[in-house]
Amino acid sequence: MFGEELSEAPREALPPFRRRIGVVFQDFRLIRHLSAFDNIALPLRVAGATDDELEGPVREMLAWVGLADRASARPPTLSGGEQQRVAIARAVINRPDLLVADEPTGNVDAEMAKRLLHLFTALNRLGTTVVVATHDVGLISATPGAEMIRLDNGGLADPTGMLRNPPPRRR
């Protein structure tokens, strides 16, 4: 991963690699007793950021996902869409090298979905590889520059002809 063989890496070598990956889970996986601010700040704290260093980036990310006024709210008091936005902000706050998102727009309205896909596109332009799993083909199709690979019967389908050597279809 990231140009290094990890299959036989010692256990203590794995956390630095994990910190380079942002994950948006379909079920949010927020820490219930932490505020939205602290859930988003968590990856920065784990990486060693001080409170002064993380204040600006976390506030900016809260504003970006439309939750500046909900910074102190805990997950149980947030709607599903708000929790989704906190989860996305947490996944992208440290500009990961790889972002994997499972149905990241499933709980938000159409306008916020477009805004979040714009955020993912901006991250991609900055060098982050973004992988989004979604059933919302229309949203991906409407996102400039987004490439789509479709899964069909457990294999990759290639309706666009973009895959160089697509695997054979299973029957």
Image (cartoon, rainbow, N blue to C red):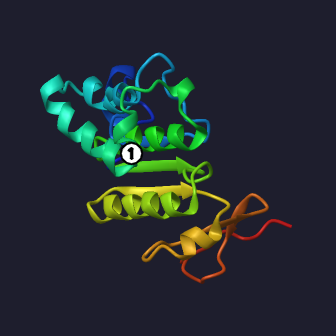
Q: Which quarter of the picture shows residue 41?
A: top left
x 37%, y 26%: residue: 72
x 53%, y 56%: residue: 132
x 79%, y 61%: residue: 153
Give x and y (percent) for residue 53.
14, 31
Relative to 145, is 170 on the left or the right? right
27 up-or-down from 169: above or below: above
Give x and y (percent) for residue 95.
29, 47
In this view of the protein, which residue sits in the foreground, 2 or 88?
88
**Residue farthest to the bottom, as pictured:** 161
Secondary structure beneath label 1 = loop
Name the image quarter holding the C terminus: bottom right
| Amino acid at the residue labelled 1 | Met
Q: Which residue is mark 1?
A: 1
Q: How many marks?
A: 1
x 44%, y 27%: residue: 73
